[in-house]
Amino acid sequence: MLGTAEVSKLASADGSASAADGAVIRCAGLTKVFRDFWMRNRVRAVDGLDLEVRRGEVYGLLGPNGSGKSTTIKMILGLLHPTAGRVALLGKRPHDVATKRLVGYLPEESYLYRFLNARETLDYYGRLFHLDPRSRARRIDMLLEMVGLDAVQRRPVGEYSKGMQRRIGLAQALINDPQVLILDEPTTGLDPIGTRQIKDLIVQLAQRGKTVLLCSHLLADVEDVCDRISIMFGGKIRLEGRVDDLLVQQDMTSLEVQKLDDQTIHQIEQLLAQSGRHIERVDRPRQRLESLFLEIVHRAQVEGAATSGATAGGPVAQFLIDEQRGAHLPDGVDAAKVIEQLVADRPIQRPAAAPSRQGSTGQDDAMLEKLTRRAEDKGVDRNRVAVREPTSAEKVDRSVIDRLTGDSCDAQADRRSDRKE
């Protein structure tokens, strides 16, 4: 029997949920039980989960293997039917087809067609979202550069390493410029360079208003990028809150100063003793191993060392972070120039149309303009087509044709009369 609070959560999580409160993903009482062939309960993967992800935040789902993270994500996407509870994604049920266009998903395993190369793979997913050829080509170029696969884009993805397959998997999750990005173990198999790049990308996308749901068991990755986290175990959320609030040690204070000698440390110890406190530990700060690794690799790249794998990657694809491009403008139109022309009261310069198959020269354009002007001067209505009789000069001269064939009509008639006689 559900209480009043639970009923309220379920009511707010149905397909009519409004996005006014900023909730992009909402789960209430979400439960998933896997059964065997005889319909006996075997595994309760998710047990009464309540979850809310707000617009523009990076939310992390943490937990060991088998805690229910991936099952929760699949129910949010509509890939699994919940045994009980409700799910709302962008204010709609997960099975709503229109909502799928606004969601990007990177699964835990990279399910790719191994005989397609990277470019063909992204083109395939772009076609699924009905992107026009020009937009597909433009986005594919940007994404391949962003994930560092532009140099190996013609190789079949079956020959890629696991880290390279994760990179192309991330690119396919972004091909449709999603509002909600769901990442299941995105840094698995990636080297520290790729891991750092993925984390920087997640932060930038969140700054541009996109919502990211990150599922991982790598605590360092989640700590660096997430605004809020949930720690799951046994299908339940055991702890939830903001990262800073959960990790700050309220009963400790740390000071960071330049190097101190022993005498200065002794004086500080005496000062603290007057208030009944003492120094717990004195040590030198350590550099993170990730920072040291990236520094060594960057130094090798500057020296011109070659690599046969994925490169460090380029900037974030412009179509993902372009704030000025309107939602209804095509990719080839610069919104800033359109606004400038409108303000200056000048006609908008549209992109040049593709040339026709027959082609047209400047002489043809001049001739059309001359004919049009002549028709206007004579008062001819161009919308009506007038049919006139051909002049005598335009009529066919049959005598010329008869001479070419060797006989005239009169000669043929005379020969017929002679035969009768």
Image (cartoon, rainbow, N blue to C red):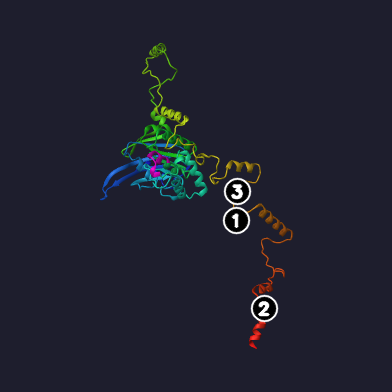
Judge left or right: residue 33 versus residue 350.
Answer: left
Which tag is nearer the camera, tag 3 or tag 2?
Answer: 2
Q: Earlier in the sequence, mark 3 or mark 2?
A: 3
Cα gap from disc 1 to disc 2, whole angstroms: 43 Å
Q: Which residue is mark 3?
A: 352
Q: Is residue 164 magenta?
A: yes
For label 1, the SS is loop
For label 3, the SS is loop
In percent of width and height, residue 125 lies at 44, 47
Crowding near pointer 2: few (<14 within 10 Å), some, many (20+)? Answer: few
Q: Which residues are magenta?
A: 157-167
Q: Which residue is mark 1?
A: 358
For label 2, the SS is helix
Residue closest to the eye, 120 or 256 = 120
Q: Which mark is residue 409?
A: 2
In percent of width and height, residue 134 lies at 52, 48
